[in-house]
Image (cartoon, coloured by chain):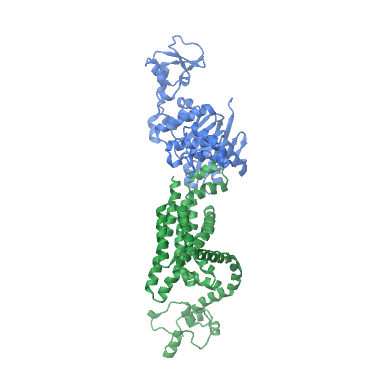
Chain colours: A green, B blue
Amino acid sequence: MATYDFIFSSLGLTDWCAEGQSDAPMSMESLLQRTKGTGGEPESLWDTPFPSMDALNESCAAFPQSRDLTKGLEEGFLSIKDSLSVVLDPLTQPLSWALDGTLYGMLNAPWWIVIPLLLAVVFFVTKSWKLVGFVAGSLFLLAFIDYYRYAMETLSIIFVCAFICVLFGVPIGIAMSRSDMMQRLTIPVLDMLQTLPPFVYLIPLIFLFSVTESKLYGIAIILYAIVPVIRLTNLGIRLVDKDVIEAADAFGMTSQQKLFKVQIPLALPNIMAGVNQTIMMSLAMVVIASLVSAPGLGVLVLQGIRNLELGVGLVAGLGIVILAVILDRVTKASLARINASQKQ
Amino acid sequence: MDRDIKISIRNLYKIFGPIPDVALAYVRRGMGKAELLEKHNHVLGLQDINVDIHEGEITVIMGLSGSGKSTLIRHLNRLIEPTAGEIKVDGKNVLDYDENRLRNLRREHMSMVFQKFALLPHKTVLENAGMALLVRGYTVQDFEGEAKKWLARVGLEGNENQYPHQLSGGMQQRVGIARALASNSPVMLMDEAFSALDPLIRSDMQDLLLELQDELKKTVVFITHDLDEALKLADHLVILKEGHIVQQGEPQEILMHPNDPYITDFISDINRARVLRAHSVMKKTTEPPTDCAGDISDRDNLESVIARSEGDTNLTYRVVRKGKQVGVLDMKELVKALVPIESAEGETRSRY
């Protein structure tokens, strides 16, 4: 006898409950109770359990326990997993290629080509020698302490993932800015992606793809990092001065002309702010993704935690900070350059 | 009428709200703006507007903020869709236009100048001036000459490669005007084009507009809340109040014969001597006056006539247009005309 027996008896479900009856203990708690020989009836009102799934299961064996819920979810996912993989695998394969290709390229080119190339990119987007000097110093420092390889792995992953985020994020943001319906539908998804702990969406990904494939961590990083660029593209386009849009209309611009000649150029500062955020978030995620075999500095951090190698963990952490500062400064500087050219 | 009608607005209504058609039925049955807002939560934007805009003239639409003047001008190129009525440009109803024809109208026939300039901040002055041509598919090389010509015409020679934020407000609006002129459209819509400028620059810009107008003879629709500006520019003045037309006509005519206490109140503060012209005050006659003190032009304002008479009210002048006498101006009549029509001044003051 248990607390909530009366519910099932009053509903006339006693027979249905009896079907699930079994004498074997269904949980640790009931096993303990049985060995101690105490009944399920609480002694006073004070001890009345919440009518949860487990409490109701005590009264009615046919009622599912809470672990049946998580188990059902898992089984459901596993049953659709194979067909889902058939669709997702070929769709995401290019991501694997891109990641593997970039990693191969960055790691196999000699350092005296890669570093000047990176510095050239920095100069191209920021036009600032000071920043080029800072980046050169940081990269040489990382290379000097023999973290060059790890840093390049991390950078390659970030480049690929951030590029794909922009590739998909900007059009999604534009679509959101043009339709309120689209915005209403997309925002909850973005909110979820942003608040779901990153570890949580690693789990289904592990089931879907094999851990040896690079797209596994690629997808995790992209899902996590794509949110700001979508949000800020949408916001940027919606914030474009109404008067300028009206002028564009009054001079007979088509909606395409308006988008490419007015809205996107004027939203560019916001879009770039989104790209900056996206890059920073990819960096955060690339560390976590080392749990699912993403190479780079994150692996060293993980090694530091697992083997309690304090020095390795700290230096790798510092390396990540240096990369973060580089990426942030460079994207901020190019953002400032765009801002300066279109003051209102 | 001897002048060609370029744009004709007939029975135009605009009601803002979720179901304007229902609200329109109430308005047609005589419901007022306040009642409509209170009972049905719809805003009456424009009510039964009828205006003929003549070719080659400056038509000024004047009213206080909230009177619907900006709404009205946006109906002409359908930036705002009317609830009911028709707008004919060159005899064709704009409201029947499909998207392509409407775009063509906006590209080729109507250009617009905005209160807040609305220049593209990321484009140079030259590219901004050529915006209308850029929209039509020309490249910068194609329109460079044309854009430069108009920039020079509004006094911005040498600023072509600057960005709008590097220019002062007055200069930015000159770019706005050059942009409208470069589109080479017969109609120019000017939405409070000079309201954001300081008084001296505003006066300069008004002179520039009049000068350009003498030369180009565009059909200009000008929106303003400033009566002095309206009187300076207007060939035809339309006064709006709470979405309906209170009075429209020749500005001098409105000054001499206001038909509404609202207008009386409006015009009571202006310098009549400067605004009124000889032909509005004179007695129409071709008979020469008995003791003529001299000839004055019918376009002379009263201020200049007073200056010429040195304050002597016993004089009589012959008013001449193109060498022919059109009337006689008695200084006594002139002085009388300087006193604003006093109709219930105290009462209207308290009402507005």
Q: What residue is rendered at 62% in x and 36% in y?
A: B92
Q: What residue is rendered at 49% in x and 54% in y?
A: A233
**Does A273 sit above or below residue A82?**
above
Q: What residue is rendered at 47% in x and 72% in y?
A: A291
| Percent position of residue A237, x then y | 50, 51
Left or right: residue A35 compared with residue B218: left
Q: Nearer the viewer, residue B235 or B210?
A: B210
* Count of marks, rendered view: 0
| Percent position of residue B4, x then y | 59, 28
Q: Quadrant of residue B5?
A: top right
Can residue B314 be seen here? yes
Q: Nearer the viewer, residue A202 or A127?
A: A127
**Does B295 sit above or below residue A121?**
above
Residue at the far top in the pictured view? B290
| Percent position of residue A37, x then y | 42, 90
| Percent position of residue A141, x then y | 40, 63
Can residue B29 be seen here? no
**Does B40 sit above or below residue A150?**
above
Image quarter hosting the C terminus of chain A:
top left
**Does A206 sit above or below residue B69?**
below
